[in-house]
Each structure stands twice: as C-alpha cells, then as structure tokens.
Image: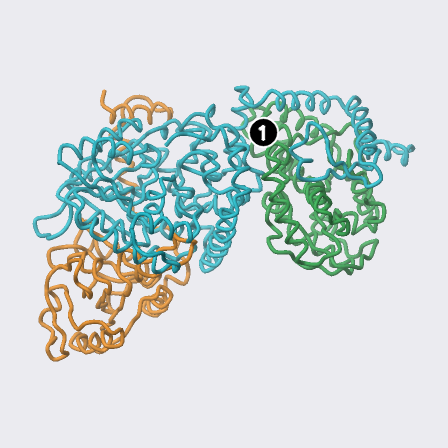
Amino acid sequence: MQVQSMFFKESASKKLNDAVLQKAMKKAKSKFVDGRAASVATIDNWEDIRTHAAALRDRVIANLDAYLIEFEKNAIRRGSVVHWAETAEEANAIIVEIARKNAVKTVTKSKSMVSEEISLNDALEAAGVKVLETDLGEYILQLAKEPPSHIVAPAVHKSKEQVAALFVAHHHKPLLTDISAMTREAREELRAHFLAADMGISGANFVIAETGTTLTVTNEGNADMVTTIPRIHCVITGIEKVIPTLEDFATLIRLLPRSAIGQSIANYLTLTTGVKQANEQEGPEQMHIVLVDAGRTKLLGDDMQSMLRCIRCGACMNHCPVYQNVGGHAYGWVYPGPMGSVLTPTYVGIENAGDLPNAATFCGECQVVCPVKIPLPDLMRKLREKQFDLHLRPFSERFAIQVWAFFVKRPVLYSFASRMGARLAAWMGGREKLIHKLPGIDGWTDGRDMPAPEGKTFKELYRKKYASRKTNP
Amino acid sequence: MKVGLFVTCLVDLVRPNIGFATLKLLEDAGCEVVFPSEQTCCGQPGYNSGARELSQELARKVLAEFKDCDYVVAPSGSCSGQVKIHYVQDLFRDSPDAVERKEFEKLSAKWFELSDFLVNVLKIKSLPAQFSGNVTYHDSCAGLREIGIKQQPRELLAKTGCTLTEMNDAEKCCGFGGTFSIKLGEISTRMADNKCVNIAVTGADAMVGGDLGCLLNIEGRLRRQGDKKTRVYHFAEVLAGMTDSAM
Amino acid sequence: MSARENILARIRTNSGKQGATTEQELVAARAVITARTRGPLPTFARHEPIAHFIEECDRLKTTLAEVHSLQDVPAEIARYLLVENLEKKLVGWAEFSALNWTGARIEFINRAANANDLVGLTGCFCAIGETGTLLLLGALATPKVTALLPETHICVVKKSRIVPTMEDAFQLMRDEIGEPPRATFFVSGPSRTADIEQTIVIGAHGPYRVHVVLIP
C-alpha cells in the first residue's frame, strides 16, 4: 500500500469534519472500550497473563532465527512448502508464481494485514488472477476500493447505508436496510466463490514452531473455508508471528479476542498443519507458507524491538483518543493508531512517516490496554528523538525548542523573560482575561481561547511576599 | 521535615495562585517549605519533542536544586511523572555514572505529587477550607497512569464538603498533551470538546483537576464555546480556599 | 544467498549474534518447546469444567440439551429440528451411522457435508469448559466441512470429554493421537460478524445455529 502518512494532519482535519465517520467512530468506541473492559474483568489474573505473554513473545524475538528454523523444519515435515521473502516485491512474486504454476484463476482470501502491506491483491490481479476478499469487512472495502481503517474491524468507518448502496451497485439486488439481511446477502454472494476457488490465501495470527502449524482467529468462519476448500492454500505472514508451543497459543488466545473485541474467545480458531492426508476427503493438496520480513528485522536490536511482540489485537487504537476522533485512514498506511505510529516509521522509513510519532498526547491508555505490554508511548517518544536528531521536524519547531532550551537552562534570564511574558500575555487577555489569538500558537487559539496569565510570576510574587525568607535550601 | 516546592513552569508563568495554594496547604500541615528560586522546568516539553540531551541537562538541574530536601512536592501529576518515572526509567537508566543514577532514584522516591503527598505522606485529617458546590474531576493522564493519582484528590475534595459528580470518561485525555495541543491543534480541540460535553452533562459548577496544562486546555475550549460560567480550578485552590483569587 | 539465508543472517546481525544459528541455540529453543510451559490460568477456569461449559455455551448462543445416552440422541435431535422448524435430514459423521434414526423419523446420511446440506451432525474430540469451545480434529471419518457448511451444526459432546482449559485439550490430543492433524478446529458458537456498524449478527459464513447434545 502507498504511504500517505506525510499528510496525517490534513487528512485528520478532513476526518474530523466527516459526519458519517464521526458517527461510526463514536459507536465503535463504546463497543470496543466497554466490551473489552467487561470481558477483562472476568479474568482475576489478567496482569499475570499479560506478563507471561510479554515474556514469551520476548523470548521468541530474542531467538527468532532458532524458532523460525524449528518452525520451518516441522512445517516441511508435515508437507508444507516454506518460502521466505525479504521484501514486499519478493512476497508478491512468490505468490504470483505459485498461482501461475498451478493455473490458478480465482483466489478466495481471508483477512491478512501483511497482504495489505505488500498490496498482494494488486499483484495477483496484474497477473490475471481474480481475488475475492471474504471477511465481510474486507469484502465491503474491496467493493468500495478502499483500504482498511482498522486492523480487526476493517470497515469500521462505513455506515450501513454506505454498505447497502455498495451491495446494490455490485449485487444488483434490491436495497437493504437491515444489517442481518446485508450479512446474509454477502454470505450468499460469496458461497459459490468459496466452493469454486482454485487457491485460498490466508494470513496467520500465529505460527507454531512445535508443530509447523499456522493458525487464524476469526468469527465469521471465512478462514475455515479458505483453508479447507481450495486445492491450494497459501499462508502469508510476518516472521515475527512464530510462537514456540500450543500452550503459548492457549495463553495468547486468552488475551487476543478479549483485547480486540471483548469476546472471551473467537468463534473459530483454525489450526492448519500440512496438506490433505491419504485418509482425508477434504483439505488442500498444496500448502505454501510465505514468511515475510519487509522491514521486521530492522526492529531487532533497535529501540523498537518490543514492537515485535504485537499480536494485532487493535486495543491500542480502540482506546487511543486520537484514533477515536480521526479514524484509521488519516494515518495513511496499513496500520493505524499507536501501533501504526510505531510500525509505519520503522517499516517504511521515518522520513516518510511525517507527524505520526507526534500523533499522540502520551495519555498512556494504549500501553495500559496492550495485552503484551508494549510501551507504545516510549516507542513513539524514541521516534520523536530520531526525528529531532535527523532534523526531520519543521524548522519553526526546532527553533522553538532551541529558544526554550536557551532560557530554561539560564534561571536569571528565564525569570526575566517569564516576567515579561506574563505581563504581555496578561495585557493581551484584557478584561476577559482570555487571549483569542496568539501568533505562533495558532494551533491552540484556532479552536480555543488561551486563559491569560495572572500577570506576575510565582517567583516574583514569592520573593516579594517572603522577602525575608531564604529561597534556597 | 524540609519540603521542596516545585511549582512547575506553567504555574509560575500562568497561574501563581496554584503555587501559593500549594504552599499554604503544605505549611498549614506543618511542613517547612523551601522554594529553590533557580527552578525553571522539569524538561518534559523538550523530552516529549525528542530533545533527549537537553532533557537530561534539565533533569540534572532539578536534581541539584532539590538535593537537600527530604521531600519534593509538585502540584502536577505530569511533571511528577517526568521526575519519578522518566528520569529514572529512561533518561538515566543506562547512565554509566552509578552514583548519579542512585541520586535520581532517591529523587524519584522523595518526589510527590501534591494530593498523593497530602494523603499518603502527611495523612492530613482536616483542611483549611470548606467548599460548597458541585464539582466534577478530570483525571490527568500522566498522574493517573504513570503515578496512580486517582483517589487521592477525590478523598481530599470530599473533606471540603463539596459534592463530586463524576463525569463520563473522566479518565479520557482532554487533548492537551503539551506541544501536541499546538502541533495537532484541531485534533486536540476535538478532544477538549468531548471533555467539555462530559463536563456539561454533570451540571457541575466547577471542573477540578490536578494539572494546569489540562485546565488551560479545557477552560480555553469552554470559553471559546461561550461557556463563561463553569469554573475551572486546580484542586489545590479548592482545598486551600483560594478559589476567589483564581481567575 | 537466498532470501532465507539473508533474513536469518539479518536477524542474527541485528540481534548482535555472530555467524549462523548454532546447534546449541537450536537445542535451547527445542528445550523451551518440549517444556511446554503453561501460562497462568484464570481461577474460574480450573474447576467445574462441565458447569462452565454449559454457562459459556449459553453466552455464545450455542443451544444445549442433555440426554441419558448416545441412543437418546436421535430423539433429542428430532425434537430440536421440530422446534427450529428444520428439515428432518442430517448429514453426519460415521460414528453416528448405527443409531436408530428411522425410529426418530430422521433421514441420516453419512458423508461430508456440501453447500446444499442444511444440517450437519458431528462429534468432537473434546470440549473446553473455560470457553464453551468444541475441538474437532479432521480425518477421513470426521470431516470438518460438516461443522462448517450447513446452516445448522449439531455436535454430540460426551460430558466425560469436557476438559477445563485449552491447555488440557492440547495435552489430551498429544496423549491420544500425537501431533495435531491437518485440520485442528476450535468452534465456539455459531459464526458471527460485527463488520457492519459493529452490530453483532449471528450467521456469517459458517453456521447460524450450533446445538450441543450432551451425553454421559
């Protein structure tokens, strides 16, 4: 997917004034936030489970090569073909080649964010392969020709009216108003495709080293169709998704659906290991697993390493006050919200990420809800440090920091400057004691007044009041 | 007990009344309060803008200023989080100077946010002032999530006799976020808007909080929307009976 | 160098390790794998798996009925089909072929379900009390599609096979059959989606109804 993150501010501004989106975001916020809270409350040792999960993810990441080699060995032993892709282009080329070799005409696909990263659908379509997204949200977006705005609920930004209109345009059936009827129509529309597809492509929430298993977590059942019915199944996933054992999966699945959507468990946990056996009447004859780097190894040994723990639950964005107000598209790439503000700069380059590391108040909610305890605000701050060191922030901002730094390090000058500043600003506030416009901080005064200072600083008042007192300990 | 007062750069510049309210609360409770006049800023604006070395310099400056105090108290959860958490866990975590690291750990341990200090260190029983009226409390993010300020200010406000009506999403960020409020002003304003709606629903006469940044942000939005009525106070002003001298 | 070697080399270089992955490191990873350390379990999940299973099924909108023996299953299914106004025709797993279906006036066909079948009958390898989950293991006699394609999925669950947690289910699988089969499939209630306006709709691509018949 093309990176548009440089335009975060402009894009966010549009989203703030998009009534349909604002309504959708308000609804989503209450569902996600309240749902998670209620579901987490049923677990008496949530913190222990988080701690255990973070540690198990860290252990894998610290020995990623060994676990990948183990995974590969076991996957091959069970009949899968394991491919490695360094870049998006390589990953696309591998999958296009699998399709070409097997004369694949049609593909059904369950949700994969990695495939969004690398624009897999475009690559397949260019090679003459018809691709159909089968997750309802992804299907809606495919019809709308839009990228997802959320990693778990990709069409969260769409209203049912918009969906109904899309269905009329593409299904050529009467307009529906009821969400269950729309869901049924999509089911019926997609059923035939599930049965007829030559190849199924799925992502993987995790891959298990112990058994060579790939697995998906879904509510709709689409991934089960995709992994069971076509004669070829292709899994595309990031190299960081490996976990050691089935037990580790059991731990992580206690966290994932609860954090994502407040469910105690997802409806379908689909573990797939190898190909159709001699004693089976179903299952793919070929099983391909494409392990993608595409920037992930850059995080190893870096300040950003803990980001590789991420299990893609979306809780950080669901709870982020910035995301809640602007939605996912404003972030300009595949991953929105706090995790996106870390992943986008690290995957596609900090110079292409614009304001993303700054798109946070550091309120800390993301860190509190993250099931694997990723210190997201700290990571975003580290990225700000990189931007500062690389002079990637605007001159005005760097200049302001330099001026501020000059004064705060010099108490006498600082006291003088703040006395002057307090007086000037108090005068500007007038009788109302409110400043309506203050050049240089228009970002503030465009939408808010600035309550004016009292007029004298604490320091000077203190000195006057307690002239006799020693001011230094 | 020698208590150092760190007023914060915002209070010094914009609302000294909060500083004097803090001073009164501490002195009424019997503390010997000292005010190192060289203090400027804890460094957080620079720290959160990516200016790491500069924030280390300022941290050292703060450390030196309060070396001789038994405690340091600040009327801010955000500056307190910077000193108690970020100095030690980030800025000097990997410092090769073990002595200096130790000093920052000591500073972290003796540094308290005002309400936390009044409740958990001084364990004060009574307050100088009564406050009648219906208030609602906004939890500032850093205070809440970095250093656990939640019940302390509420406990203290209850002692003044005021009625506390909790707003929806009291723990939701108001949109201030330091320089965020200027860099991404439009989003920041919308977040403040949401806060203002939740405040209005409570019907409170006053919105009380513990960090001046949030208070300025919320008040600025209330006033711009034409609400001249809802008062916005720091809890120190309410507890010290100094709301009249607040704006 | 292949992509594989490049990626593995980059992992090692960036992690500050020299040379290729050593045998020692692989042994260490395998030791972690074979240790199969369990994570912390929520307190409630450790006890009374059957009671929890019943409770969780209700939450998941899985309906549930209990009968005295396997022989009573056809009668219960007849009752269920009548109540739900469904046709008296089942496609199901071989293990149920010998039951007296004609006595219950149900047409039972032993084969894997296809997209035209409306009701599928399966057993399960075991079930999980903590979450109300069914574990199905695909094989010749236990095709997964039967639990997936029909609009109604009926599953016979032996109470004696309800284990407390997913960890227990995996251990049971290892003890009884070894490695996970190609299709290892956890079902927790009817399929659902909330992709349109976050409104939960039961019945997405999988079944609209999941009905559990509990036997001893």
Q: Quadrant of residue A204?
A: top left
Q: How is the image coloured?
A: by chain
Which residue: 43% across, 25% down? Answer: A349
Residue that numbered label 1 is attached to: B91
B241 sits to left or right of A72: right
* Rendered shade, chain B: green
Image mark 1: chain: B
Q: Nearer the viewer, residue A136 or A91?
A: A136
Depicted C108 relative to depicted A236: above or below: below
Tag 1: amino acid: Leu
Secondary structure of the residue carrying tag 1 is: helix
Q: Is residue A248 visible?
A: no
Work out which quarter of the rendered image holds the N terminus of chain C and state it.
top left
Which residue: 72% across, 31% down? Answer: A438
B22 sits to left or right of A52: right
Q: Nearer the viewer, residue C122 or A436?
A: A436
Q: Which chain is orange?
A: C
- Residue C107: x percent and y percent? 12, 72
C49 sits to left or right of A74: right
Please tell me how many numbered marks the rendered image carries. 1
